[in-house]
């Protein structure tokens, strides 16, 4: 089983979370009140259980994607922020000194484990349902902005950029 691969955290610094992550913190409430073990049930068929190296905990990977959704950050930004944001580390069930994943691991997780796009929606919906049951989220309605957004990188080739800019320059001159 995937959950049997995970190890316990033995760190002398775990007590720091009680000092720097307040009880009212949203991520602390989510982590303390929501049982994310449903992620194992949903993803058990997506992992090989008999060979290969130990996988990064699917709950942690799901939580990275959940943080990405909550805070509207890129893979690189969410991993970078989880290096120094103690509420993120607490939510991800990491020791304060534990290193974070590579941003490319999130891409691999999405492509290899969440091939079915609806699966990610299902996992987020289950998390929201549990959060509503535990009264972390008070409202019965959730508004989601589903507009398409551009990625950080430039989607046009250099030649296309030059052609577009020259067209704009000619238009401005005329």
Image: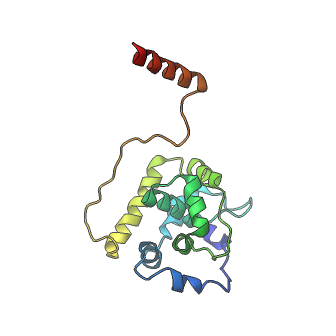
Q: Residue at x 54, y 75 (%)?
A: 90
Q: Residue at x 29, y 59 (%)?
A: 142
Residue 76 image position (x, y, % from top left): 59, 54
Is there any visible trace of residue 1 in the rendered image? no
Is there any visible trace of residue 32 in the rendered image? yes
The C terminus sits in image quarter: top left
Vertical position of residue 74 compared to residue 28: above or below: above
Residue 111 image position (x, y, % from top left): 58, 47
Q: How is the image coloured?
A: rainbow
On the image, which quarter does residue 8 sit in? bottom right
Q: Residue at x 65, y 61 (%)?
A: 101
The N terminus sits in image quarter: bottom right
What is the residue that sits farthest to the right in this orientation?
A: 52
Vertical position of residue 106 compared to residue 10: above or below: above
Camera-nearest residue between 88 and 122: 88
Q: Is residue 26 left or right of residue 78?
A: left
Camera-nearest residue between 90 and 86: 86
Camera-nearest residue between 160 and 167: 167
Vertical position of residue 143 compared to residue 92: above or below: above
What is the residue that sits farthest to the left in this orientation?
A: 140
Residue 148 image position (x, y, % from top left): 40, 41
What is the residue that sits farthest to the front in this orientation?
A: 173
Instruction: Give the number of callouts.
Output: 0
Q: Is residue 98 left or right of residue 21?
A: right
Residue 35 image position (x, y, % from top left): 46, 74
Q: Residue at x 59, y 60 (%)?
A: 79
């Amino acid at each position: 089983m995937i959950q049997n691969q995970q190890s316990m955290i033995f760190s002398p610094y775990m007590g720091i979370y009680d000092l720097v992550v307040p009880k009212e913190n949203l991520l602390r409430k989510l982590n303390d009140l929501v049982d994310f073990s449903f992620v194992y049930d949903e993803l058990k068929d997506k992992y090989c259980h008999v060979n290969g190296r130990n996988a990064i905990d699917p709950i942690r990977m799901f939580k990275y994607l959940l943080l990405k959704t909550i805070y509207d950050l890129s893979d690189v930004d969410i991993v970078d922020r989880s290096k120094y944001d103690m509420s993120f580390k607490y939510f991800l069930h990491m020791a304060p000194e534990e290193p974070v994943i590579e941003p490319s691991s999130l891409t691999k997780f999405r492509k290899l484990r969440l091939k079915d796009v609806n699966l990610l929606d299902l996992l987020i919906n289950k998390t929201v349902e549990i959060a509503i049951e535990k009264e972390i989220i008070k409202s019965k309605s959730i508004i989601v902005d589903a507009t398409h957004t551009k990625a950080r990188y430039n989607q046009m080739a250099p030649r296309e950029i030059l052609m577009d800019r020259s067209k704009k320059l000619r238009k401005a001159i005329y």
